Image (cartoon, rainbow, N blue to C red):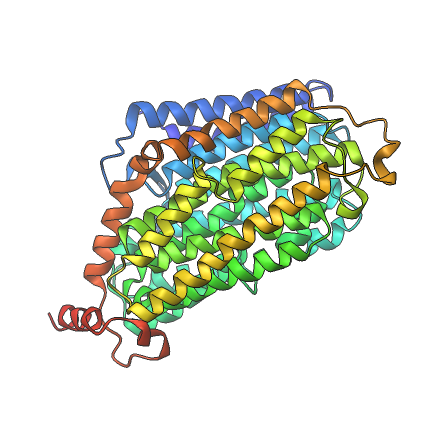
Amino acid sequence: MFPWLTVAIALPLLACLAVPFFPETKVKWFSFTVCMVDFLILVAAFVTNYDPTKAGMQLVERYQWLPQIGLEWSVGADGLSMPLILLTGFITTLAALAAWPVTLRPRFFHFLLLAMLAGMVGVFAVQDMLLFFFFWELELIPVYLLLAIWGGKNRLYAATKFILYTAIGSLFILVVGLAMYFYGDARTLNMVELAAKTYDPTFQNVCFLGLLIAYAVKLPIFPMHTWLPDAHGEATAPVHMLLAGILLKMGGYALIRMNVGFFPEATRTFAPLLIGLGIINIIYAALTSFAQRNLKRKIAYSSISHMGFVLIGIGSLTKIGMAAAMLQMISHGLIGASLFFLVGATYDRTHTLILSQMGGIAPKMPKVFAMFTACSMASLALPGMSGFVAELMSFVGMATSDAYNFEFKALVILFAAIGVILTPMYLLSMLREVFYGNMSHEVIHEEDLVDAEPREVFIIACLLVPIIGIGIYPKLTTDMYAATTDNLVDVTRQRMVANPAPGLLNSVYRPEFMAEGTKISQR
């Protein structure tokens, strides 16, 4: 079988070596071409060798690397990883196109962009814990440099904060991975084999908490979210697209793949906590976004708010809730990338991000205004767009969950609904301040207030097509992962057992659900 995933990872890494030999004026073409070819390879792998109706791992490649410790080159894709691998190739290709105006050290910029592509595809594709840690760390270095060199005035602070938060969180991945490796008689780093192991409940709880800390930084989950507004506040448009479109999804993917897939008993214990953190994310970040006067930071807090629905979907312990978490990650990857690209395009023209210094620019930039409005409507979950379907599925998954008592479900739905109400408030007020009213004195004399160029229209069109397509016919996307997420929920619930000493987190479960777990434990 052709090694599709290995080629998709190796191609951008090898292309990095050729970047220094290209003239600065031509390197953008080379980078865009490599990203496009890599994306087409991923599409070809999906079309010719991937069966969405199968729940197991496909496109599997396993090569012995260091057999003495069980390390091997192991890659594969299932319903959890394949949609996000395709999303990575798609968003990165558009980010390479968005990076065309970069004139400061363009060769180094595109070198880092291609290295990031390899790292992000690797995170979703590898099936070995040590390799996963390696690729998780690989993408940190390019992001740090992209922020530190091409960022805004406070770029060094933002870059340092990013690397500290994410690097410290990554240590928990390494420690937990080694703990699972040494647990029991069988020594393995393969994720499928690790998921099949049976772990002691206390061991599960400790490992679950360790991985939750690591992935809470990346998702991000309150209170480990503070690096994200700073990073977005200083990043350039292509880096924005990668941060919002892909990097946040790595945390959600790993949370489902490892926390839920490896530790079912701990999942039962911590699921109410995940839902509670999701509610905090939704409401706290929405209120904070409403108060922001910096356009980039406002959209950044909006991203944090939307990730709360991923946590609610995971914590619902239902098939539709897990499907909602996946769809929300895909949907927000498209919407977040589009909004941040437009924020960058607006800043390039107005030379300001402060809302009080903007206003009245719609007549001068009608295309930018129309695209910004369409993407904002998608973000506030307008029916007919992907955000609406994903959030609606989260509500349905929570409402139909047989795991929780009525009072808890009603409280969760109430608070989530408050977040849904707050979202259009801050997004519509943002549109009003940026585009409506009289033009401010700060931008009235700007000579760069020209409308969107064809390249920018093309990028947003490419993002809006799947956003609207998913909103109108979500089955196109949900069928890609339904078999895997349904099987994951079934297997997880079968392996769940009741905690011997139910605590505060377990008090929200229905007694029947707890009794069912006790019977499974006794069997």
Q: As rendered, which of 425 and 102 lies closer to the eye?
A: 425
Q: Is residue 292 above or below residue 9?
A: below
Residue 319, image x and y in percent?
Answer: 27, 50
Q: Nearer the viewer, residue 200 or 365?
A: 365
Q: Position of residue 467 (x, y in %)?
A: 47, 33
Would residue 330 be found to the left or right of residue 157 on screen?
left
Residue 256 in the image: above or below residue 4: below
Horizontal relation, residue 435 to residue 520: left or right: right
Would you identify the image quadrant in which residue 448 lies?
top right
Check the image and name the residue furthest to the front. Answer: 437
Please report the residue visible at 51 percent of the width from the left and 54 percent of the height from the top: 421
Residue 338 visible, this angle: yes
Considering the image in quadrants, where does the N terminus appear? top left
Q: x%, y% of residue 227?
A: 63, 56
Q: Name, please, the residue furthest toward the left.
A: 523
Give the vertical position of 118 relative to 403 (above or below). Answer: above
User: Nearest the camera: 314 or 283?
Assistant: 283
- Provide residue 67's location: percent of width, then percent of height: 34, 48
Residue 361's place in the image compared with 208, above or below, is: above
Identify which residue is drawn at 29% across, 30% down. 50
For the question of whether residue 60 can be seen, the reply is no
For the C terminus, which image quadrant? Answer: bottom left
Task: Please name the residue shown 24% across and 64% down the image.
Answer: 198
| Residue 350, quarter of the rendered image | top right
200 with respect to 94 (left or right): left
